[in-house]
Image: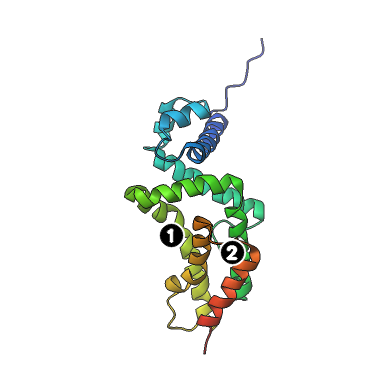
Amino acid sequence: MVDKPAPDATRRSERSRRAIYDAALALVAEIGYPRTTVEGIAARAGVGKQTIYRWWPSKADVLLEAFLDLAEEAAREAGHQPYEIPDTGDLAADLKAVLRATVDELLDPRFDAPSRALAAEGLVNEELGRRFVAHLLEPQLQLYVRRLRAAQERGAVRPEVDPRIALELFVSPLAQRWLQHTGPITHAYTDTLVDYALYGIAPR
């Protein structure tokens, strides 16, 4: 009698985790955040709800982690490191590259519908909004802060410029266009945002 190998619990857990991520993102896109429940996520993923509660305390935690995972996956597919903006010494080129990747991500159907649902809910659900900013948005904005500070050290940005405010010159208009459909979001658009922003913050 040949002994069967023991089931790989690690592999099984990873499959379940990925199924839960996919289910959470799909549901919030289809029916919105308020109607998405842990029970619904569990049913869509084919797991027991206790499996979800073992790993996450709430549906918000599931969705936030699923979004972080999705962002990392998108960065890998685009050939970018998930947590750094390139520093080639050319600030404009580096900002244009990362904003082009952001446009591609925003236009990706996997990202667009669930992120819109969560962004909209965050406007009326204060707790979710705070967590969305703290766990997803602010860490991304700090990447721009670090890159702009590196440029300041090289003299490419005026020393008195506040990087946290300066980054809003190109990030905020893109977010507004995407959220409110006020115009198309394209590589040409974000390239122009960078050109306009850097003209205003370059040394005089």
The residue drawn where x is 51% and y is 29% is 44
| Residue 88 visible in rendering | no
The residue drawn where x is 58% and y is 69% is 95
Q: Which of 49 and 129 is in front in this view?
A: 129
- The earlier-in-sequence mark between 1 and 2 is 2
The circle on residue 99 is 2
The residue drawn where x is 50% and y is 56% is 179
Q: Which amino acid does label 1 sit on?
A: Glu
The quadrant in which residue 94 appears is bottom right
* Of labels 1 and 2, the one closer to you: 2
The residue drawn where x is 41% and y is 42% is 61
Mark 1 touches mark 2? (CB < 8 Å): no
- Relative placement, left or right, of 96 versus 114 is right
Q: Position of residue 130 (x, y in %)?
A: 36, 53
Q: Where is residue 69 in the image (x, y as percent from the top left)?
A: 53, 46
Q: Where is residue 76 in the image (x, y as percent from the top left)?
A: 63, 52
| Residue behind mark 1 | 138
- Dot 1 falls on a residue whose secondary structure is helix
Q: Position of residue 99 (x, y in %)?
A: 59, 64
